[in-house]
Image: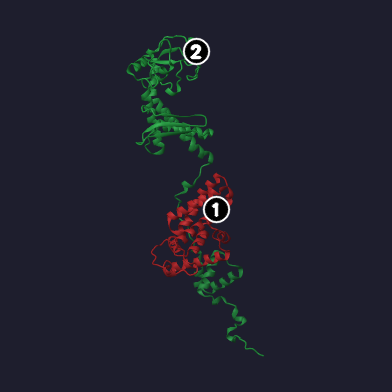
Amino acid sequence: MDFPRLTPPDDRMPSGRRLFRRPAELTDEQFDLMAAAWAEGALSGEAVEELESVMTASTDRRDRAGSFRSIRLVPYNENWPGMKSAVRLSPALTAFRRSVIPTLLAVAAMVIMIIYGPAGAKLKTINSRGAVNGPAMTVAEIQVYAPIIAVERIPEPNILPVRPVQTPAAEENASQGHLAEGMEKPAEITGLVRVEPIALARGHATASSVAPELIPAIISVNIRDIQPDMTLQEEKNWMFRSISFLAGAVTGKEKKIDGYMIANGCITGINNVFGWDMELDRISNKSGEPVAVTFSSSLLSFTKPVNKTTP
Amino acid sequence: MIVKEYNNAVREFGDHVFRFILRSIKDSHRADDIVQDTYEKLWRCVTEIEYGAVKSWLFSTAYNRMIDVIRKDSRLVDVEYYDDSTLYAEENGNDLNEVLHRALEKLPAVQRSVILLRDYEGYNYREIGEITGLSEAQVKTYIFRGRVALRNYLVKTSVWQ
């Protein structure tokens, strides 16, 4: 059985002669593409011969091909504006710039502040006079041979009678009735010295930590005169102002520096260096004023009320 | 590559990469950002790249980044079917190089890039193909068509009689 077949007509089957393209038959678009390649030097041998034959036959096409040689872009002198920011420093130089130079500048600033501050003026005074003159202040120094609370009970007959010693400040406090809780008036003690009044009055101990027993070992209380520092408060204020100024210069903000902040910074630094776990917390009342400071570590913990006179 | 070589790459090729990107996208701020990103990327892998290959790496990375930016801006013109009705305009300038650069701005992005790499940096077809991710034949085609378009621009704007 014969099936119908689709056969192309003769006019759709080009003869072999029509497959070849003669140079004169090149369209302008074909010629331009060849000329552009020729101007780039990208034509092969046979294509170059074909193009040259066309250019030889036509002057217009020769000029047209020649024009492609002049189509070349020349760069302008446009500079990259961000070049400086892309340049990197070596790691050593970067570390030097980031750590050593600020440290040196901070040290230099502190030295300048110390030299030109009250401490520097004081040093100049000492150097010129040899000593700082000022009114004497009497303080009591208690010689402690053993911890105050570590007292053995001693029978009454073995206690040696001693003369009670009172400092002027203690006498004044006693006369004004400013004795701490649990204190007895020294005048009422005959022949014995209690450690509580003196220790509490001088701020060396708290009432809870002082044993109520009589301590015969603590019998010597020396009075000595020391030279008070007239500019101590002034120096403290100066140092706090300097630290506050430096903190403001570094952070760019005005920040109030107090003792708690400094102590907390020191504890944080020690924790970072030694890997310890110490904590310092500030306890505030409802109005936001600090009332106590709590310190805790694995070895020691305590809570201390805030002294409002402390800067 | 060490830090010194990286800095040399910044000083030696920074202007070239910036020029190439600037002429391709015609926006100095974007070009600056693209070149900054390119060098930031180079810095992150600075130890993995040899100094001898850094120039083509810079151009390739900057080109790809530029294509991403163009695609994000939806300003990428289809290479094969771009409309050339806006290609020709009245041209009053006499400086051939200036007119050519204005004509270059009217070309499709890919043609523009390959012509810039060819004329500005003198790369061969293979190197341009490596930078742009095109085959050598495609690079040739884009360059030849771009040249023809530039010539036609010059003729039709009466710069060339």
User: Which residue lies at the image location 41% right of the left edge and 17% below the top edge?
Assistant: A198
In the rendered image, the quadrant that contains the C terminus of chain A is: top left
User: Which residue lies at the image location 37% right of the left edge and 35% below the top edge?
Assistant: A285
User: Which residue lies at the image location 41% right of the left edge and 12% below the top edge?
Assistant: A223
**Residues tagged by mark 1 and mark 2 found on one chain of the structure:** no
Choose between A78 and A307: the one closer to the eye: A307
Q: Is residue B135 left or right of residue A247?
A: right
Element type at marker 1? helix
Is label 1 or label 2 in front? 2
Element type at marker 2? loop
Amino acid residing under circle 2:
Pro
Chain coloured green: A
Give the distance between the C-alpha atoms of the residues marked 1 and 2, in whole angstroms: 97 Å
Can the viewer see residue A188? yes
Amino acid residing under circle 1:
Lys
User: Which residue lies at the image location 50% right of the left edge and 54% below the top edge?
Assistant: B17
Q: What residue is disc 1 on?
A: B55
Q: Residue furthest front?
A: A156
Choose between B66 and B44: the one closer to the eye: B44
Mark number displayed over residue A155:
2
Can the viewer see residue A206? no
Q: Is residue A273 above or below residue A30?
A: above
Q: Position of residue A229 (x, y in %)?
A: 38, 19
